[in-house]
């Protein structure tokens, strides 16, 4: 959200009503106390003349404000604008959250987004009130606070796990942002576990249809890579510095206008991957979605409206690895969910890499794009033409010609995908739906969509025309239609 587009009157109304839907969308800075809060902070509402509004926590910090110790404003879902508009600023924020600035610097971030470092800094400052370094610093501070409060990791381990370059930088930042030392933060909240795992609570807006999300993931789970139970989902992770495993406890929360939490327990080969692992799981959960805005858009629609009321808060399942979901999209061409899962399981068994610290049922990483690019079509358990398309796709991913990290412009990615022989609109759009977090994708030729519409008494041949009225949330309409087929969805 552009700092110039923050209307003070509208923001203040949200603060007075303590509207949780705006948590993470903007932040309230109070001149008389020197702190900044989330809009839903339970403290007494400050006077209008004493507040200013900021589009990011980093902007408030750069203006000299400290985080409120009561409402913890940094521990909020991110702005839904990052995925809805997918501006360069929003795409950059996704990469910053993934730790790109810590690993590659501002130059690396700018290259991924397609701008010069100077122009990107101007753009981010205009849109979010802070440049890439300040935004990365705010993200590091938030990760550090969570680790301080929930684990017994040493402060040195926490510093490097959060992306700080030194313990001194870590100490100085924590004191500046939270007006407390690391020791005081830990003492105030109590100590966590010493199991070697890192457990975090990931904030999501409500309503949150966790059961439906879990069902979607479970029916597609690949043995060795993924596992699921009644209220949990777990999988292996391929991360910048090593491998890992995450286990999610996924609630189902029907109450709107609140903040719910998904418990995520990470076992990481290298703690420096904490931020990247957290961000990728948030993408999987579609955690930054504003479900109230989505449901409001479908109110009164004769097809999707009743489905939204039946399953409020349905999410578009993202993914932890764009390369993996691209491969799985090709495997899912013109086959059932079960068929695609069987082929994926064979690829994993033959070409997957061992995870560093396996647990029962989770022992392998999905094969890398470079590994699959080195195969020949004859090596793959699929029709020869599809095998050629898969290998060509993996070669483009491995070389960096196509990036699925949410950094490049979505339209540019789609054009690059369609340029590969054997990659058609269905595959490109499915990748956009799940890898790029595109909220406005619809697959009118999908067999699952056609079956769902027929089951609702609609003519499947009118799918594309119907979907025109569902913009800009067609991805959510897509999921609601698929959900009507659960557990016999025909779609991968």
Image (cartoon, grey):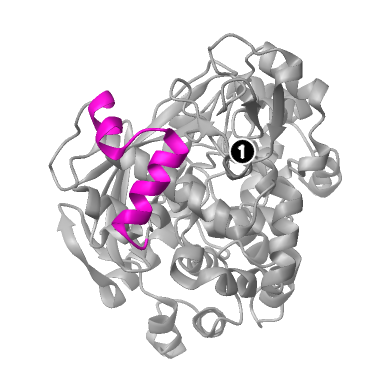
Side of 461 where 97 appears, left or right = left
Indicate the quadrant where residue 225 lies.
Answer: bottom left
- Residue 306's x, y, as percent? 69, 22
Disc 1 secondary structure class: helix
Residue occupying the point 76% across, 28% down: 298
- Residue 359's x, y, as percent? 16, 53
Q: Closest to the observer: 281 or 440? A: 281
Whether residue 487 is visible: no
Residue occupying the point 45% across, 85% down: 373
Indicate the quadrant where residue 35 lies.
Answer: top right
Residue occupying the point 28% across, 64% down: 243
Q: Closest to the observer: 370 or 418? A: 370
Residue occupying the point 49% across, 52% down: 137
Side of 458 where 426 appears, left or right = left
Q: Residue furthest top?
A: 44
- Residue 430's x, y, as percent? 62, 58
Side of 326 where 91 appears, left or right = right
Q: Residue furthest front?
A: 32
Crowd band around label 1 with a 10 angstrom C-alpha radius: few (<14), some (14–19), many (20+)? many
- Vertical arrangement, residue 187 with respect to residue 443, above or below: above
Q: Closest to the observer: 158 or 402? A: 158
- Vertical arrangement, residue 15 with respect to residue 400, above or below: above
Q: Mostly what secondary structure, the magenta segment?
A: helix
Q: Give, as a single range, the part of the protein colored magenta.
A: 165-189
What residue is pinned by disc 1?
A: 60
On the rendered image, what quadrant is the N terminus found in?
Answer: top right
């Amino acid at each position: 959200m552009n700092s110039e587009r923050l209307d003070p009157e509208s923001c203040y109304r949200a603060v007075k009503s303590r509207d949780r839907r705006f948590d993470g969308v903007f932040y309230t800075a109070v001149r008389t106390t020197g702190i900044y809060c989330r809009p839903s902070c339970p403290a007494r509402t400050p006077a209008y003349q004493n507040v200013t509004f900021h589009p990011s926590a980093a902007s408030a910090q750069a203006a000299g404000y400290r985080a409120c110790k009561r409402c913890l404003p940094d521990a909020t879902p991110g702005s839904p604008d990052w995925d809805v508009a997918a501006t360069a600023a929003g795409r950059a924020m996704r990469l910053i959250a993934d730790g790109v600035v810590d690993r590659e610097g501002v130059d690396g971030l700018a290259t991924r987004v397609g701008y010069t470092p100077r122009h990107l800094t101007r753009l981010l400052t205009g849109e979010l009130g802070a440049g890439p370094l300040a935004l990365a610093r705010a993200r590091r501070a938030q990760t550090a606070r969570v680790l301080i409060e929930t684990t017994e990791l040493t402060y040195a381990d926490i510093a490097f796990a959060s992306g700080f370059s030194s313990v001194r930088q870590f100490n100085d930042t924590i004191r500046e942002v939270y007006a407390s030392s690391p020791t005081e933060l830990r003492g105030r909240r109590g100590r966590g576990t010493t199991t070697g795992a890192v457990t975090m609570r990931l904030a999501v807006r409500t309503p949150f249809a966790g059961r439906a999300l879990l069902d979607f993931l479970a029916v597609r789970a690949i043995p060795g890579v993924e596992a699921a139970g009644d209220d949990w989902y777990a999988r292996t992770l391929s991360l910048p510095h090593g491998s890992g495993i995450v286990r999610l406890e996924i609630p189902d929360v029907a109450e709107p206008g609140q903040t719910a939490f998904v418990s995520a327990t990470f076992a990481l080969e290298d703690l420096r991957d904490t931020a990247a692992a957290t961000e990728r799981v948030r993408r999987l959960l579609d955690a930054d979605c504003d479900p109230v805005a989505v449901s409001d858009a479908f109110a009164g629609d004769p097809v999707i409206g009743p489905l939204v009321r039946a399953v409020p808060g349905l999410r578009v399942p993202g993914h932890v690895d764009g390369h993996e979901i691209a491969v799985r999209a090709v495997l899912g061409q013109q086959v059932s969910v079960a068929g695609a899962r069987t082929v994926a399981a064979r690829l994993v068994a033959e070409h997957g890499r061992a995870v560093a610290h396996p647990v029962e049922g989770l022992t392998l990483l999905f094969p890398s794009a470079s590994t699959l690019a080195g195969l020949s079509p004859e090596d793959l358990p699929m029709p020869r033409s599809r095998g050629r398309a898969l290998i060509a796709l993996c070669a483009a991913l491995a070389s960096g010609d196509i990036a699925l990290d949410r950094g490049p412009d979505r339209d540019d990615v789609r054009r690059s995908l369609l340029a590969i022989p054997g990659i058609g609109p269905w595959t490109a759009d499915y990748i956009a739906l799940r890898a790029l977090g595109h909220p406005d994708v619809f697959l009118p030729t999908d067999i699952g969509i056609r079956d769902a519409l027929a089951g609702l008494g609609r003519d499947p041949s009118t799918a594309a025309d119907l979907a025109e009225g569902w913009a800009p949330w067609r991805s959510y309409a897509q999921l609601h239609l698929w959900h009507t087929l659960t557990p016999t969805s025909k779609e991968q």
